[in-house]
Image (cartoon, coloured by chain):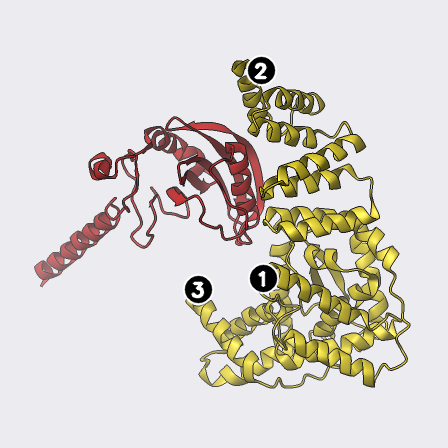
Chain colours: A red, B yellow
Amino acid sequence: MKKILTSLISLLLITGCASVAQERSLNNLPDNAFSVKIPEGWWKPKHIDKYLITKDGVFLQYVLIQQRPIDRPYRNTKKKLNKGMLPQEAAGVIIDEIASDRRIYNFNVIENAPAIIDGSKGFKILFTYKDKKGSAFKTLYYGFISGDSFYNLRYNAAIRHYFEKDITAFEQILSSFKVVKDAAALSIALDR
Amino acid sequence: MRYLASIIAVCCLVAGCATSRPVPVTQALSASAEEQMLWSRAQEEQDTINCSGVLYQDAEIENYLNQIAKKLHTNSISPDISFQIKVVKDPNLNAFAFPNGVIYIHTGILARMDNEAQLAALLAHEMVHCTHRHSMRALRSLKDRTQAKTATAQNLAQLLGISGSIASISGYTRELETEADRVGLDLAVKANYDPREVLKLFELLKQEIEIEGIEEPYFFGTHPNVRQRIENVNNWLAEKYRGKIAGIKNRDVFQSRISRLVLDNARLDLRQGRFLVAQRTVEKFLALKPDDARAYFLLGEIFRQRCRQDDAAAAIKYYEKSISLNPSFPEPHKAMGLIHYKDGEKRLAKKYFESCLLLSPDIADKAYIQGYLKLCVTNGEG
């Protein structure tokens, strides 16, 4: 009886670990026209269908990378990005979008400056905010316009402890970021 | 989340078809455990709002709003409620009341108003939600409908706490909203305000909703719909207030008190990309203060950011006006630099960027401006 119980417990542990390992993988990252190198230990939550990865859970930190059509409307501002915009103007639209979001409290821009991302002229915005429960977060948001797309990479983390802890990992991801112009080469270039 | 969604669904069902059980309004406030719970929940939500950075901080405006509320409160049925009016930085047309007498008004609705009589009508409406205990009545109605299915008193208490707060923000039943309109109008008339102004307020808001194609907000919401509300007010004016149309409006006092808020709200409209509304609001402000450099700069920003044909020329005109009114205001210099930089006029861009940095060496966009200046020089136009 004791043997059976031990076996059952072991089986439970093994299957439990297996399912966690399966969840904490980079499988199911959506295909995109960019490539990045993701450091060890980061994984994609199953239930999110975006290019979003985390290390300790999305409420503690995440990196989100997006390529969106330049003319796609935003949720909180009617302003739109356009091809002829300077990075500073694009940053202004993004700040207005975030500042108009009713789920964002105590929004405060710490830095708004030019940046180069994959050789393109863009911007970086560093800001803090709180959610409705009063939890404080810090976000580093990089963005640039290329052709008909707006690319953005953002690192969001709890201010306390987590933001500083994983900023280096985000910088590695950012420096490895490449827009893949040839869609056929996409699957080869995706370096996970 | 699912729990909250079910409660909202229950609320919607109740709001849609229930007739709320009357609460004796003379009964002492906070007498029952239910009401105390409601107030406690309201306080929690107010704490969240008050700490969220969304409050518009202007003691003078708050004092003014509280004075109007006090004047209206003289004739209310529930003198033991202590009203407190606060302003929320939000360009959307809304106002909401918590059962404990704390009322929040958005800058958006204040900025659209024309006079004190319209403000009084709005405040009186919200105050009636408190004095006539509309949250409590909504909750009792909810309780009647959910009691049988609720296992414990504690569950019910949670249900009441959450749904009560929701009701105060998202609106009440048609019956309760009509009561707030009717009694609110009466309070405004008793305080000697012109009752016709409530109609003008409705019309003003209706126009804007049509221009912007926005959803009707709560104050102007669908319970009952706006046409019905206008019709109701027209009927009351004809029947009850015939001959009492010469009340006070206090237009000048109102407009001078809220002028700064009007301009601040135009910035919020611009942030949301509501260019036409922002433009009208700034023009309204300029009618009061025609020599304000910040207002001309904001008009310039509206045109520059809208990016339609000929907008750049209009923006330049307003920036130049702003600079002529206040040459030491750095923002229009920066904006002029941007327009000329994008237009390839690097020499002019350089001149404005340099003057901007001279006026404000630590301006927030300094890093961008320094980058533009480098390019102006390397392009050989320095």
What percent of the width, then of the height, locates residue A7? 11, 57
Label 1: chain letter: B
State the quadrant of the C terminus of chain B: top right
Q: Could you say whether the residue bearing mark 1 is in a helix, strand or loop?
A: loop
Per the rendering, the mark at residue B1 is 3
Q: Going 87% across and 75% down the picture, which residue do you hit? A: B190
- Mark 1, Cα crowd under 10 Å, few <14 / some 14-19 / many 20+, is few
Q: CA distance from mark 1 to mark 2?
A: 46 Å
Residue A3 lies, with reference to residue B312, above or below; the image says: below
Determine which residue is flagged by label 1: B213
Which residue corresponds to mark 2? B381
Instruction: Output the chain of dot 3.
Output: B
State the residue at coordinates (88%, 75%): B245
Please state if B89 lies on the left or on the right of B186 as rendered: left
Q: Whole-percent x and y of residue B4?
A: 47, 68
Q: Position of residue B258 (x, y in %)?
A: 79, 52
Circles 3, 1 touching at the beta carbon (< 8 Å): no
